Amino acid sequence: MARELAGLAADGDMALPLYGVRPGGVAALLAELPPEEAAMLRFQNFAGQAGVATLLPGPAGAPRAALLGLGGEPAVHGFGAAAGALPAGSVWRIAAGEYSPEDAALGFLLGAYRFEHLKTKTQKKLAQLEPSQVPERVRVVAQAVCTARDLINTPANLLGPAELARAVLEVGARFGARAAHVHGGEVAARYPALAAVGAGSERGPEVVVLAWQGSNTDAHAPLLSLCGKGVCFDTGGYDLKPGAAMLRMKKDMGGAAILLGLAQAVMALDLPLRLQLRIGCVENSISGHAMRPSDVLQTVAGLSVEVGNTDAEGRLVLCDLLAEAARESPDWLIDAATLTGAARVALGPDLPALFCNDDRLAETILAAGRLVHDPLWRLPLFDGYAAWLDSPVADLNTVSAKPMAGAIVAALFLRHFVPAGVAWAHVDVYGWNDSTRPGRPEGGEAQTLRALLSAVESLKA
């Protein structure tokens, strides 16, 4: 399912220099340019505005270079406008400036992403980047982000549990990972809570577990364990969502897509660690077989769980995966999910919530997010709300009866399935861009993938 990066030109194409300009650098730029070029830029009111591109003409009238306004955006976002703002089919190389050339190249490639292969009409051709300009790590990260975006953007009729499982298996096979594919009746035996979520759909639940280790590692290398919520479509079950709330529910497998992209990058970069990836692939639907509010389910951890709301299904998918993953005593255990609307109410669409039981792990992830401009915000695992999950008939309920602190309560539920001593981080993401901005086209988004990769690169034995 891997696609070529849209923003890369063919080897050998002639490339022109592309300069990123911030508003504060315009005066110095005008002073350096020939008077006629400076006058042209003044006439065009070029002020380094984000996303504004202008061509500098050469002696024969053909362009010799281009300027791209970055505004106040970091380079990874500012250069995201380049592919659409520059002439169609033109080829560019990033010129030196007050920005990281790697960030600029990554921004260019991420901005060239389009999910248009289901359309029949030919789309506008984009500007492209000279391949020699793109370091291997930049290519790997861009491809990982685009893999996640493609999965999130794919309609649910084309990406059900079986198709998502197949995508995970394909990535694993590409890098020689060992794979366990759990499907059919084996799912209920091995992952009972997860199986209950998928019981209402004709497209049965599946789980894929990948295991991989770097080429220069041994059994003592640090173990990174990832668990992703892969709900390919979420109707809410018997606690049915309103129609408007279902319009974007193809993205409810965003956590799985993001962690699959992260795993792909870890393997492509051959990081010196051991990796385990667990993806729960299900559809939350309605039928005579679907779970009901007040049902009591068993879990991998041995805890009984009362279903307080069938639309709180993601935590049931994750709890079984987390409990199984924790048995391997990973150095870091990370899950990601489009889990709660409460996190979006608290932090909005662009700031994923981080919950963590280990301060060192939390700060490593937060610092990485700041470094690569892929931010998260830490919310507390507040013990004062733990009793809100009490159930009169089971070990715990999936939800609280109180209409507050929904993201915290969900994280507290998951914490029951992570033993003390395992460093665990839970990421509650939106996984979507509501509108197009430079480098962030409308649609599925691999939020936190770059932050988590940067953090993981620091993981040492």
Image: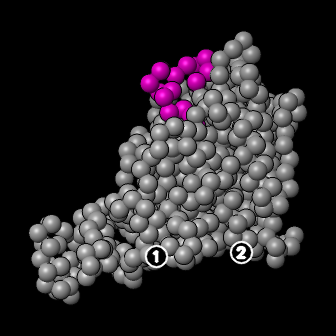
For the point 51% across and 38% down, the residue is 119
Q: Earlier in the sequence, mark 2 or mark 1?
A: 1
Comparing 15 with 366, the one in front is: 15
Residue type at mark 2: give it: Lys
In the displayed structure image, the side of residue 414 where residue 328 appears, left or right: right
For the point 86% across and 73% down, the residue is 218
Where 268 falls versus 385 (above or below)? below
Q: Position of residue 103 (x, y in %)?
A: 46, 71
Mark 1 lies on a secondary structure that is loop
Q: Decide whether residue 249 is among the magenta residues.
A: yes
Q: Which mark is residue 245?
A: none
Q: Which mark is residue 14?
A: 1
Q: Is residue 287 visible?
A: yes
For the point 68% across and 33% down, the residue is 160
CA distance for labels 2 and 1: 42 Å
Where residue 233 sits, quadrant-wise, is top right
Disc count in the image? 2
Where 239 falls versus 103 (above or below)? above
Q: Position of residue 245 (x, y in %)?
A: 47, 27
Outermost front residue: 60
Q: Mark 2 highlights which residue?
A: 460
For the point 69% across and 14% down, the residue is 287
Q: Contact (CB < 8 A) between labels 2 and 1?
A: no
The residues colored magenta run 235-252
Could you tell me which quadrant the C terminus lies in?
bottom right
In the displayed structure image, the side of residue 410 where residue 304 appears, left or right: right
Mark 2 lies on a secondary structure that is loop
Q: Residues within 10 Å of mark 1 (few under 14, many from 20)?
A: few
Comparing 77 with 14, the one in front is: 14
Q: Residues within 10 Å of mark 2 (few under 14, many from 20)?
A: few
Residue type at mark 1: give it: Met
Q: Decide whether residue 458 is among the magenta residues.
A: no
